[in-house]
Image (spheres, rainbow, N blue to C red):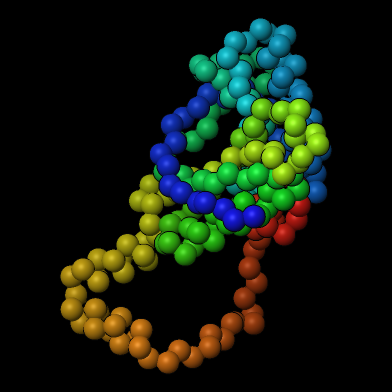
Amino acid sequence: MEYDVRLETAAPRPLAVVRRRANVQQLPRVVPDACGVVWGVVRAQQIKGAGRHVALYLDDQINLEVGVELQTPWAGYGEVVGSALPAGTVATTVHFGPYNRLHEAHQAIRDWCANHGYALAGPSWEIYGHWEDAWNSDPSRIRTDVFYLLTAGGKSEDDSLTSELLESNPEFQALVAKSKVSPRKPFQANRGYNQTGTLASSLSSEPR
């Protein structure tokens, strides 16, 4: 599917979560199980205002927090603790379809940020829509909102420097204009470079 990636300002949202560590293959089991643990405590403690399920991926080691949205901060009970979604500028899109294709939404955001010069801060998260009966017969309607926190400056340092030079340096402007009309040589990759995979790149190649 095509994804409409956009920028938003995210406010901190209180959560009730359990903290987990899992590899990509374990996520389809770990996330639902963790949601069940949290909902069990939410019901037992009669916490009001619980919302949608959330999975917050904290780093590229797949340390994650899984739980539900809350209206107000909460101290926690047992292994279920209070937390919050990060605040700041985010790149976000909506995925409609089964969860095993969520990697496509993650990749769309990463590609959009790379093409537009935005730097990822690290955390990303998925907010799962409240389940509807119609989704049982038509999984293409399942809604998941995907978010990536961006660095405080938004644009990457290299991109910001380029913008400043384009605005203030006539010689640099001339070089850029010349490069646009000059024939391009193919890029030769460094065969010795070994890229370390991250959570999002894993999601882009492995279904959840």
Query: Residue 146: x, y in percent?
Result: 58, 43
Residue 198: in sight, yes or no? no
Counting from the top left corner in percent of width and height, residue 28 is at: 79, 41
On the picture, is 70 further left or further right than 197?
left
What count of labels does the image hold?
0
Residue 186 in the figure: left or right of residue 151:
right
Image quarter in which the N terminus is found: bottom right
Q: In this rendering, would 3 be left or right of 162?
A: right
Q: Nearest the camera: 155 or 1?
A: 1
Q: What residue do we see at 67% from left, 21% from top?
A: 80
Q: Position of residue 43 (x, y in %)?
A: 71, 11
Residue at the (54%, 46%) spot, across then down: 93
Above or below — where is 200 with respect to 179? above
Decide: is 50 above or below 103. Answer: above
Quarter of the image where one finds residue 143: top right
Vertical relation: 193 (above or below) 32: below
Of 208 and 138, the residue lying toward us: 138
Position of residue 108 measured from the top left corner of the image (x, y, whole percent)? 58, 57
Is residue 202 depicted above or below 180 in this figure? above
Query: Does residue 47 show up?
Result: yes
- Name the one closer to the observer, 79 or 105: 105
- Residue at image position (45%, 56%) is 119
